[in-house]
Amino acid sequence: MHQEDRGRGRTRERQESREPVPRSRSGVVGRRWERTGDEPVTARSALGLRLLLAAVFTPLFIAGAVLFSLWSASAGPDAAPSAGSLALIAGICAALAVLAALDLLVVVRRLRRERNGRRRG
């Protein structure tokens, strides 16, 4: 049976054995992933920069996918860049557009969560 010290959250058993607190539990309660390196406990992603980059590159990749697919559709059999290579580039642009759009959604969700947390606190 563990008896907790008042306000410290440590058990007497842990206090007596002087075991260090595991790295995965050293900061935030309910951490999703263990800290694997020596990054700071308070390390944060540059959400503003990610928002800017995702907002700029999502429409650019969509435009690239559309333009390369149109070019691929109109390319003749003896065209310098073949229709297959243009279709491949269009597919890559479409995949990058999807990734940028997903990142945009994640960043917006995190920013909303941060703002809502500040209002409640």
Image (spheres, grey):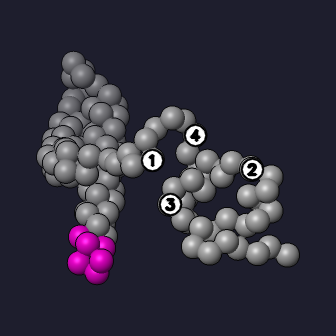
Instruction: Determine which residue is flagged by label 1.
Output: 41
Are circles 3 and 2 on residues that touch, CB within 8 Å?
A: no
Instruction: Determine which residue is flagged by label 2.
Output: 18
Spatial distance from mark 2 to mark 1, Cα to Cα?
22 Å
Amino acid type of the residue that numbered disc 2 sits on in the rendered structure: Arg
Query: Mark 1 vs mark 3: which is more N-terminal?
Result: 3
Amino acid type of the residue that numbered disc 4 sits on in the rendered structure: Thr
User: Could you tell me which secondary element the residue under label 4 belongs to?
Assistant: loop
- What's the residue at 54%, 60% (across, down)? 31
Are circles 2 and 1 on residues that touch, CB within 8 Å?
A: no
- The picture places residue 21, in percent across and down from the top left corner, at 66, 52
Asked if residue 54 can be seen in this view, the reply is: no
User: Could you tell me which secondary element the residue under label 1 belongs to?
Assistant: loop
Instruction: Determine which residue is flagged by label 3.
Output: 28
- What's the residue at 20%, 45% (across, down)? 49
- What's the residue at 62%, 75% (across, down)? 6
Are circles 1 and 3 on residues that touch, CB within 8 Å?
A: no
User: Could you tell me which secondary element the residue under label 2 belongs to?
Assistant: loop
